[in-house]
Amino acid sequence: MTVTEVATLQIYEEIINSDNYSVFTFWASWCGHCRMISPVFEKISDSDEYPNVKFCRVDIDTAPEVAEAAEIRVMPTFIVFKNGEREGGLTGANPVALHALLARVIPY
């Protein structure tokens, strides 16, 4: 599964309110740590580990209303949602911690 670019608040709300898990990364093109972890996030999204999970990316500069709704203060930030609820989150570019978050929160 590929990473879906989310650019509007409406699309963001539709995805997070789904009864499937969704994993969001909030990033910016000027953020070095964001660029460093991005290939890891994409590789996870392409793997068979999480077949029913939607992986999404929000550029905080082009979708500031989405970043505000998610209360993003640090980048990169990863948040797992299901049924409109925040199931877990992580800040920083730590691949091991990202894998651990997904393994802990998503029951596959």
Image: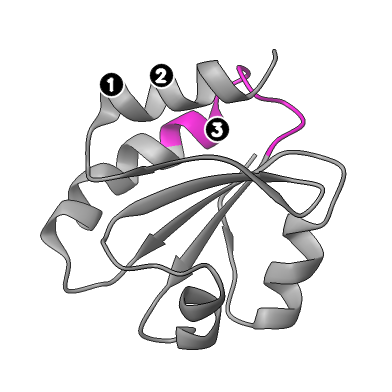
Q: Position of residue 69 (x, y in %)?
A: 56, 76
Label 2 vs label 1: CA separation? 6 Å
> Would you say 83 lies left or right of 107 here?
right
Q: CA distance from mark 3 to mark 1?
A: 17 Å
> Which segment did they paint magenta?
43-53
What amino acid is found at the position of numbered circle 3 in the picture?
Asp
| Mark 1 surroundings within 10 Å by alpha-carbon count, few (fewer than 14), some (14 through 19), many (20 or more) | few
Which disc, if any, is residue 46? 3
Between the residue at mark 3 and the residue at mark 2, the CA separation in whole angstroms equals 17 Å
Q: Secondary structure at mark 3?
A: helix
Asked where in the image residue 100 lies, by quadrant, the reply is top left
Q: Count neighbours of disc 3 (C-alpha within 10 A) and say few if under 14, some if 14 to 19, many if 20 or more.
A: some
The stretch drawn in magenta includes residue 59:
no
- Vertical arrangement, residue 104 with respect to residue 54, above or below: above
Residue position marked by numbered label 2 in the rendering: 100
Give the residue pinned by disc 1.
Answer: 96
Q: Amino acid at mark 1?
A: Val
